[in-house]
Image (spheres, rainbow, N blue to C red):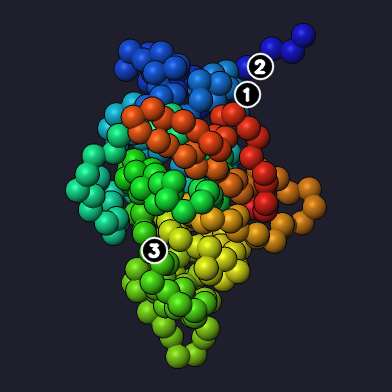
Amino acid sequence: MTTQRQGPFGSLLHRYRAEAGLSQGELAERAGLSRRAISDLERGVRRAPYPVTVRRLAEALKLNDAGRAALLSASQKPGAVISTDTPPKAEVRHNLPPQFTSFIGRLQETADIRQAMANTRLLTLTGPGGVGKTRLALRVAELELSVYRHGVWWLDLAPLRDDAQLLQLLSIVSQIGERPDEALITTLIAGLRPLNVLLVLDNCEHLIGACADLADRLLRGCPQLRLLTTSREVLRCRPRRSGASRRSQYPWRTPVRTWPKAKQSNCSLSARKPFVAGSF
């Protein structure tokens, strides 16, 4: 029988969790992860978690700057170059539209989506019109603000009428201007490449081909960028070389909610294995 040895990250995470007085389940709930994920990290089953996962844990544990830096350093593979220039919360940038109503219910769906986002770089909330994809995506984006060092950016695609306007909107939102000597997509990728950001593309269905192509290019060219999209159909991104991870893009079926008695007409992430449509 093989015994898994606890690595430096697992040992440090366990110590920080104990100091915070949290159980594995409580930390998992705060960080938007599963209890199994916390257990695997502490036992050394996973020794090099994604940076976004580390930041979620640091936020959930309410670590100071020194603690965050130590946890991030312990998560790196030997020889990796790391950056600890995490700005204060007040400097986290976003353009999320203000909400004037309360977000009621869907706590489990929100937690499931955040957990999926910790393990994939492209997540699409799918479902028919009117089931609440936009509001759910906005709520998740609000909760993810502290996770991404360079912000969360919202792109409302509903007013757009042709594919060319998609890149123009991204240029405006990201404040990356056009250059006369190169294609706009090239400029955008170069500007976004060093940034740890979450882009939320809302209402992709009428520009589904352009959105899939943009997602494909951004995910290949910007290693710290992640995408959350809403659409009535799944984005079909090209898979990478054979042998690459297949857990890179999830469509998440948005359950239909009726009041006062909630009834799900579609299945949720926790109830059904999602269809994988791409690989990044």
Q: Going from the N terminus, do you reach mark 2 or mark 3 first? A: 2
Using the image as rendered, state which of residue 114 and residue 40 is in the foreground.
114
Q: Distance from label 2 to label 1 (Cα)?
A: 7 Å
Q: Distance from label 2 to label 3 (Cα)?
A: 44 Å
Q: Are marks 2 and 1 in contact (CB under 8 Å)?
A: yes
Q: Distance from label 1 to label 3 (Cα)?
A: 37 Å
Q: Going from the N terminus, do you reach mark 2 or mark 1 first? A: 2
The answer to whether residue 73 shows anywhere in this view is no
Give the amino acid at mark 3: Leu
Q: Which residue is drawn at 67% across and 51% down?
A: 277
Counting the numbered discs, the total is: 3
Q: In this view, does 235 lie above or below 31?
A: below
Label 2 crowd bin: few (<14), some (14–19), many (20+), radius 10 Å: few
* Image x and y of residue 1, in percent: 77, 9
Comparing labels 1 and 3, the label whose residue is closer to the camera: 3
Using the image as rendered, state which of residue 140 and residue 27 is in the foreground.
140
Per the image, label 2 sits on a secondary structure element best described as: loop
* Image x and y of residue 106, in percent: 39, 33
- Residue annotated with mark 2: 4
Q: Going from the N terminus, do you reach mark 1 or mark 3 first? A: 1
The answer to whether residue 210 shows anywhere in this view is yes
Q: Residue at x 36, y 54 (%)?
A: 152
Per the image, label 3 sits on a secondary structure element best described as: strand
- Residue annotated with mark 1: 45
Q: Tell me the number on the disc at residue 155.
A: 3
* Image x and y of residue 116, in percent: 53, 38
Using the image as rendered, state which of residue 262 and residue 184 is in the foreground.
262
* Image x and y of residue 164, in percent: 49, 80
Per the image, label 1 sits on a secondary structure element best described as: loop
